[in-house]
Image (cartoon, rainbow, N blue to C red):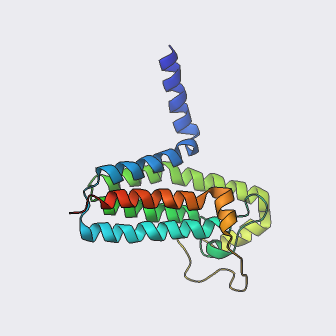
């Protein structure tokens, strides 16, 4: 009986509260492809570049977030509405390519399609409720995941803060975690 209730709750949460599992699955994916990977030099280095770019995008974005206080429209938010997700996509594809595992790309795409569209929708709805017209104006000129080539607010300059990145998101710690697993994957190079 308890197992059935546990399974029922798990399935309910997967269907209606997926965001709880998004980070766990991302972490599990990175660890899995890093430990099971069979990297080859060219693919590893191409993937490593993507991982580093993804980490850089996440660090840049997390230093500009003003969670629930001010709508972040500066820094990377002047180019794309969800730069943290862009960073995740970039580094996820980087790990998949670097691992040289045929199944890693389909697995990553499945995870992304299962979790990101509802998360983006929820986040956009929340920001719209909080910032109304300001959000609508920003949304008109800024796509969700495909960055603009030029800033939607060229005159606006924001400042990046390491402490903000550390305090609000723990991003420098996440970056070290990801680099650790990239180094572990590199040990399998032949």
What residue appears at the point 79 percent right and 61 percent down from the top-left corner?
69
- The mark total stands at 0
Residue 167 makes an appearance in the image: yes
Q: Against 8, is 153 above or below?
A: below
Residue 124 makes an appearance in the image: no
Q: Position of residue 16 (x, y in %)?
A: 58, 38
Q: Position of residue 144 (x, y in %)?
A: 58, 66
Q: Position of residue 160 (x, y in %)?
A: 67, 73
As rendered, which of 135 and 10 lies closer to the eye?
Answer: 10
What residue appears at the point 46 percent right and 54 percent down from the top-left corner?
112
In the displayed orientation, state which residue is furthest to the left.
Answer: 190
As rendered, which of 184 and 57 lies closer to the eye?
Answer: 184
- Kindly indicate the quadrant of the structure image that contains residue 152: bottom right
As rendered, which of 99 and 175 lies closer to the eye?
Answer: 175
Using residue 98 as the reference point, say whether residue 155 is left or right of it: right
In the displayed orientation, state which residue is furthest to the top.
Answer: 1
Using residue 184 as the reference point, say whether residue 144 is left or right of it: right
Q: Against 19, is 38 above or below?
A: below
What residue appears at the point 78 percent right and 62 percent down from the top-left corner?
131
As rendered, which of 112 and 70 lies closer to the eye?
Answer: 70
Using residue 183 as the reference point, say whether residue 3 is left or right of it: right
Q: Indicate the quadrant containing the C terminus: top left, top right, bottom left or bottom right.
A: bottom left
- Kindly indicate the quadrant of the structure image that contains residue 157: bottom right
Q: Position of residue 116 (x, y in %)?
A: 52, 54
């Amino acid at each position: 009986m308890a197992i059935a209730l546990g399974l029922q709750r798990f399935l309910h949460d997967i269907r209606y509260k997926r965001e709880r599992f998004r980070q766990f699955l991302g972490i599990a994916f990175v660890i899995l492809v890093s430990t099971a990977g069979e990297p080859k030099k060219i693919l590893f280095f191409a993937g490593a570049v993507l991982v580093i770019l993804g980490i850089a995008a996440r660090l840049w974005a997390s230093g500009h977030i003003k969670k629930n206080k001010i709508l972040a429209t500066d820094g990377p938010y002047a180019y794309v509405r969800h730069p943290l997700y862009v960073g995740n996509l970039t580094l996820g594809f980087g790990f998949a390519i670097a691992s040289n595992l045929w199944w890693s790309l389909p697995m990553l795409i499945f995870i992304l399609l299962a979790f990101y569209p509802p998360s983006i929708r929820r986040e956009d709805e929340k920001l719209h409720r909080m910032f109304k017209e300001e959000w609508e104006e920003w949304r008109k000129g800024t796509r969700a995941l495909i960055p603009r080539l030029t800033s939607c607010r060229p005159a606006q300059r924001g400042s990046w803060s390491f402490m903000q990145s550390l305090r609000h998101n723990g991003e420098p710690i996440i970056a070290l975690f990801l680099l650790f697993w990239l180094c572990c994957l590199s040990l399998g190079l032949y």
